[in-house]
Amino acid sequence: MNQKELLDLAEDWFANQGWKPFKFQRDTWKAYLQKKNGLLNAPTGSGKTYALWVPIVLDHIKKNSDFGTKHKKGLKAIWITPLRALSVEIEQAASRFAEELGTQFTVGIRTGDTSQQERAAQKKAMPDLLITTPESLHLLLSSRNYQKTFKDLQAVVIDEWHELLGTKRGVQIELGLSRLKTVSRDLRIWGISATIGNLQQAREVLLGPESQALENSVMIKADLKKKIDVRSIIPEKMEKFPWRGHLGLHLIDEVVPIIKESRTTLLFTNTRSQCEIWFQKLMHKYPEFAGEVAMHHGSINKETRLWVEQAIRNESLKAVVCTSSLDLGVDFAPVETIIQIGGPKGVARFLQRAGRSGHQPGKVSLIYFLPTHAIELIEASALQKAVEKKAVEDRIPYLMSYDVLVQYLNTLAVSDGFYPKEIFPEVASTYCFQGITEKEWRWILNFITKGSQSLQAYDEYKKVEIEEDGRFKINNRGVAMRHRLQIGTIVSDAVLSVKYMKGGYIGTIEEWFISKLKPGDVFTFAGRNLELVHIKNMQVLVRKSSRKTSKVPSWVGGRMTFSAQMSELLREEMYTAATLKKGKKRSRELSALGPIFKRQKKESIIPKNNEFLIETFKTREGYHAIFYPFEGRFVHEALGSLLAYRISLLSPISFSIAFNDYGFELLSDQPIDMQQVIDNDLFSAEYLMDDLYKSLNATEMARRKFRDVAVIAGLVFTGYPNKLVKSKHLQSNSQLLFSVFRDYEEDNLLYRQAFRETFEHQLEEGRLRQALERIATQKIVWKECEKPTPFSFPIITDRLREKLTSEKLEDRIRKMLRQLEN
């Protein structure tokens, strides 16, 4: 068949479904059939699965004229998805097209959820299309004779590439592809990505810089002009002194009519604990929603999650309170409305969530923004502009992730072994390792065979043996099994299963939360109040409780920070508010903030574009100094520590530090000489790394980061299924190694990587430097205030939140408000 006849097959199939292909789908079909690689930029719900699955099948038909009668078995295409939940939908779409065209294509799934029976069947006969995750791809590379499995592979599609790009799972993909390019001679590589700021770079990372694959590639953009309608839920009465958490739940009555008027609504929260609280409050206040409203987050058991997803599809639920667990992929056509609770902290995340409603092409996406405190309305106003401008964040790829490289080489050594001279050019062809030197490569090889310079005396670190012909191979079956169990780059805190005493699995919870509870304590989980009975063998045994007061679990990593893009938009919006003349039109959100702005101007100022605001005042707690860079909580945490350290060099003074996304507070029991701070240029970017190192106890942070590095590199073993090593033991094992490297082998690449990642990813050193450089160009405005201002209030109350129970906190804040309102 020629290309036109093949494309007619697809056009006819689409017509039979009552569909018409989009231009981007046709363009992708043609590019694929011309043996191009590429990156398809298309939003969720736009028909991107058919954009790439169709030409894979057409290409097979082209090469096999007798495709309807004869069928050569074997793996022909791999579809990699970051989320297991997406695999079922992709399988359904793929099977439908392949079957109705009369091919004998088989489609299979292989993820962490795949049964042993299914895996064994796949080992005997691979499906034609395998839908899998980055981890499962590496597991396949760790099996004997993997080259035979992949020899006829013609296509690899990486779905949701933007989600994988800025993570170590992305590095896993890069390394896996570098091997497949050699093993599978006739391979085409395609990525599918939502809109991000650095799409060209995303294509380069996927295909490899300066590679033939990149030269023979295209970028195809789906220009669907999807309309997004953003509406803010604005309270009738605006409090002059906002604080986090107060407003969100007070607006519950505004949310209910939206849920009732809509076919299906998704309520997105930013954290799992916020998700639990909202679900509880909705059920408590509106019991008539029982059975119509559900909850979905990553720690609830798989059966419940799948049931919820299916219930959304068949419209048996009115609303679902969820977290980022429903951000991606899963296609929910009936969803009409999205409610975002609290600032989403990033433009891309907000657009992604908005796109979950009106999911079919051409429909309007409706998203409500519900602020959890009043100042978040500035974020809402900024997001409106971001939606218009399509101003989206970059995803920064990882560089030199030695831990992932060590794991990958062990994976190859577990299977058929490898020859370093063959693998080195492949590794160096990836974006992540384009700068790797021969010396670093030799260090890595030395590390996997001898356990590096300082661990040579211990046999357990000598995993790989060098055979006579120079092949690097793992021959010990125990080492091989432990390695396969630990393939992956997602390192979370140890999680415990939550079960009823009488049986019945509820979900998983992180060890660090449970370790704070004692038997008899009641906590809220999966929408129920549960009493802790006892903990046994990594299982939390519970019974139902009718007690009303309970602790809500919080999960590590629960707090998100502003992206750089979001910070910039917020500052612009803030400056707009500061410079607006009377009578000038302002957004609904900024108008609603009128009383707060008025009070802020009375006590202090709203900083303009060229101003950096510092406020000082005294309360019974001590002397407060509040700084407003508007750069996001991670940058503020580092800035606060940096400034406290630099001030302490001028005069012996100690501080407690509090911060949120807008600013940070230094609280002391003695007044700070602010003029001295300004005169001594303490906001300078000079000596930044040195001062950060001393101020933040960077060694401690790197020590914590090293735990992840050690787990990924296989230096510490996380345990067998149902018998996981406790977090504190993992931590102490990795800390011991960290101390050994610090004292005896400071040039250890994994040790150095822990520090580099701490500065680059955790402290966002690049952004911190930019913030300091920006402050250097601004005029510093220091306001000596008599009492807390509306802008400072959320930061002060956030600090109290850490110390007080929620009931005491509300009482305390009411008293503070009464004093301030006078």
Image (cartoon, rainbow, N blue to C red):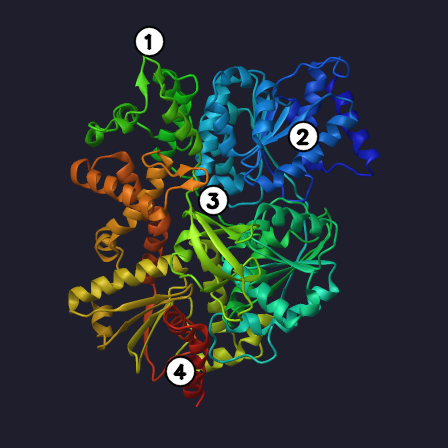
Mark drawn on residue 621:
none
Is disc 2 placed on a helix, strand or loop? helix
In terms of depth relative to the viewer, which is nearer, 431 or 98? 98
Q: Earlier in the sequence, mark 1 or mark 2?
A: 2
Which of labels 2 and 4 is toward the front? 2
Residue at numbered disc 4: 603
Residue at numbered disc 2: 53
At 40% across and 61% down in the image, what residue appears? 518
In terms of depth relative to the viewer, which is nearer, 135 or 717? 717
Distance in Å between CA atoms under marks 1 and 2 = 42 Å
At 76% across and 26% down in the image, what residue appears? 99
Distance in Å between CA atoms under marks 4 and 3 = 40 Å
Distance in Å between CA atoms under marks 3 and 2 = 26 Å
Which of labels 3 and 2 is toward the front? 2
The reply to whether the C-beta atoms of the residues labelled 2 and 4 are less than 8 Å apart is: no
Q: Residues within 10 Å of mark 4 (few under 14, many from 20)?
A: some
Q: Earlier in the sequence, mark 3 or mark 2?
A: 2
Is disc 3 placed on a helix, strand or loop? loop
Residue at numbered disc 1: 469
Res. 92 image quadrant: top right
Instruction: Give x and y (percent) for residue 368.
Output: 63, 63
Q: Amino acid at mark 4?
A: Glu
Q: Residues within 10 Å of mark 1 (few under 14, many from 20)?
A: few
- Residue 348 in view in this figure: no
Mark drawn on residue 395:
3
In terms of depth relative to the viewer, which is nearer, 172 or 523? 523
Instruction: Give x and y (percent) for residue 224.
Output: 68, 45
The reply to whether the C-beta atoms of the residues labelled 4 and 3 are less than 8 Å apart is: no
Q: Residues within 10 Å of mark 3 (few under 14, many from 20)?
A: some
Is disc 1 placed on a helix, strand or loop? loop
User: In the rendered image of this protein, does residue 564 appear above or below residue 402?
Assistant: below
